[in-house]
Amino acid sequence: MVAEKDGFVPDFTSRYFLEDFPYGLCIIKSFLKIANVQSPHIDCVLQWYAQFMGVHYYTENGFDGEDLLPLPLPQNYGLCDAEQIAEFYMQ
């Protein structure tokens, strides 16, 4: 947080904003998507983040926006189901 005259606002330049959303929540969300687990609170937080940071994680089809492509998500490496992930990590 950054102090302003009327209180505090998020520090959009902090490591938290620059790394924890794309390299934390997006990766967690991608595993939840593979497991077919709904995550409305994570979706809400990521959509809020996307508004402030100008990134596109969601489209009308869901969690498949263009700004997910450079992230280390399992789907970006061809791992799209639990069996593929288990096989990958057993290697």
Image (cartoon, helix red, strand yellow):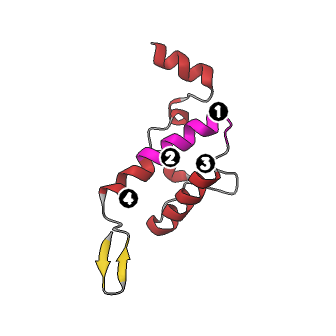
Q: Dot 2: few (<14), some (14–19), or many (≥20) neighbours within 10 Å?
A: many
Which residue is the site of mark 3? 64
Judge depth for marks 3 and 4 and give the one in front.
4
Disc 2 + disc 1, Cβ < 8 Å: no
**Residue 70 visible from this viewpoint:** no
User: Which of marks 2 and 4 precedes in the sequence?
Assistant: 4
Q: On residue 35, which mark appears? A: 1
At 51% from the left edge and 41% from the top edge, which residue is drawn?
28
Gap in angstroms between the C-alphas marked 4 and 2 = 12 Å
Disc 3 to disc 2: CB gap under 8 Å? no
Percent coordinates x, y for residue 70 in the rendering: 44, 45
Q: Is residue 67 visible?
A: yes
Under mark 1, the amino acid is Ala
Q: Residues within 10 Å of mark 4 (few under 14, many from 20)?
A: some
Above or below, comparing residue 19 to residue 54 in the picture:
above
> Badge 1 local density, few (<14 within 10 Å), some, or many (20+)?
few
Q: Residues within 10 Å of mark 3 (few under 14, many from 20)?
A: some
Residue 25 on the magenta span: yes
Inter-mark Cα distance, 3 to 2: 11 Å
Q: Amino acid at mark 3?
A: Asp
* Residue placed under numbered mark 2 in the picture: 26
Q: Residue at the location (61% across, 30% down)?
A: 80
Dot 3 or dot 2: first in sequence order is 2
Residue range of the region highlighted in magenta in the rendering: 23-37
Q: Position of residue 29 (x, y in %)?
A: 56, 43
- Dot 4 corresponds to which residue? 17
